[in-house]
Image: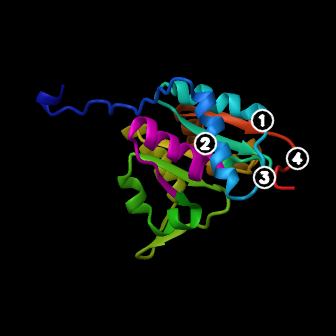
């Protein structure tokens, strides 16, 4: 196909880390030690460990209640594990950075986006841009791996439209974080 000038599907990012549960637990303990917080295994972490063992080319969509560790996972723990065990670098952005640097974000192949749902519409040279929508389009079309956190529920995620929600479903493993905040 390539020899004839036809586009070929982009290869997805595959992650396979043996003994991921133990690695995840140790990484949590390491990062929580800086905050003098004791680690307690949560039910959601089992799904994260399964994803680390074999992501099947899909990213992560971590959604649910506040204070359950979604941002800690996306900003620090998963990037550290991927760097150490797969030598893959995760480009981490909060939503304000995502909007300011959309063109830079789109150049990355593994992207962590923290706190989706709190961003404003991005304006570039007078043109409105929907940064999250552009990133999800790129994830589907170009095989980018996205790790997303949000406190939005399914109904609130619908504000992005059916097309973007469908791309979230097709490109990520969705894990819901439920329960009381662990920050208390």
- Residue position for label 4: 180
Residue at image mark 3: 67
- As helix, strand or loop, the secondary structure at mark 3 comes to loop
Q: Position of residue 56 (x, y in %)?
A: 49, 24
Q: Earlier in the sequence, mark 1 or mark 4?
A: 1
Q: Is residue 142 above or below residue 116?
A: above
Main SS, magenta region, reads: helix
Q: Label 1 belongs to which residue?
A: 42
In front: label 1 or label 3: 1
Please tell me which residue lies in front, 122 or 18.
Answer: 18
Residue at label 2? 27
Q: Report the magenta residues as a range.
A: 71-92
Seen in the picture, residue 43 relative to 100 is either above or below; the reply is above
Marks 1 & 2, CB-CB < 8 Å contact: no
Position in image of residue 162 (x %, y %): 62, 41
Q: Earlier in the sequence, mark 4 or mark 3?
A: 3
* Dots 4, 3 in contact, CB < 8 A: yes
Q: Secondary structure at mark 1?
A: loop
The label nearer to you, 1 versus 2, is 2
**Does the residue at mark 1 contact the one at mark 3 (Cβ under 8 Å)?**
no
Label 1 – label 2 distance at C-alpha = 14 Å
């Amino acid at each position: 196909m390539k020899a004839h000038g036809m586009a070929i599907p982009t290869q997805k990012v595959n992650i396979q880390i043996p003994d991921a549960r133990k690695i995840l637990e140790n990484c949590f303990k390491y990062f929580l030690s800086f905050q003098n917080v004791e680690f307690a295994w949560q039910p959601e972490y089992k799904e994260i460990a399964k994803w680390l063992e074999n992501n099947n080319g899909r990213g992560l969509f971590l959604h649910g209640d506040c204070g359950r560790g979604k941002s800690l996972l996306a900003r620090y723990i998963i990037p550290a594990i991927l760097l150490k065990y797969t030598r893959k670098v995760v480009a981490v952005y909060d939503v304000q950075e995502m909007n300011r640097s959309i063109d830079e974000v789109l150049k990355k192949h593994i992207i962590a986006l923290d706190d989706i749902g709190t961003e404003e519409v991005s304006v570039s040279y007078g043109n409105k841009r929907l940064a999250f929508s552009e990133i999800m389009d790129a994830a589907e079309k170009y095989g980018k791996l996205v790790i997303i956190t949000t406190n939005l529920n399914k109904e609130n995620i619908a504000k992005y439209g059916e097309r973007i929600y469908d791309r979230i479903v097709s490109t990520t493993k969705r894990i819901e974080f439920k329960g009381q905040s662990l920050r208390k």
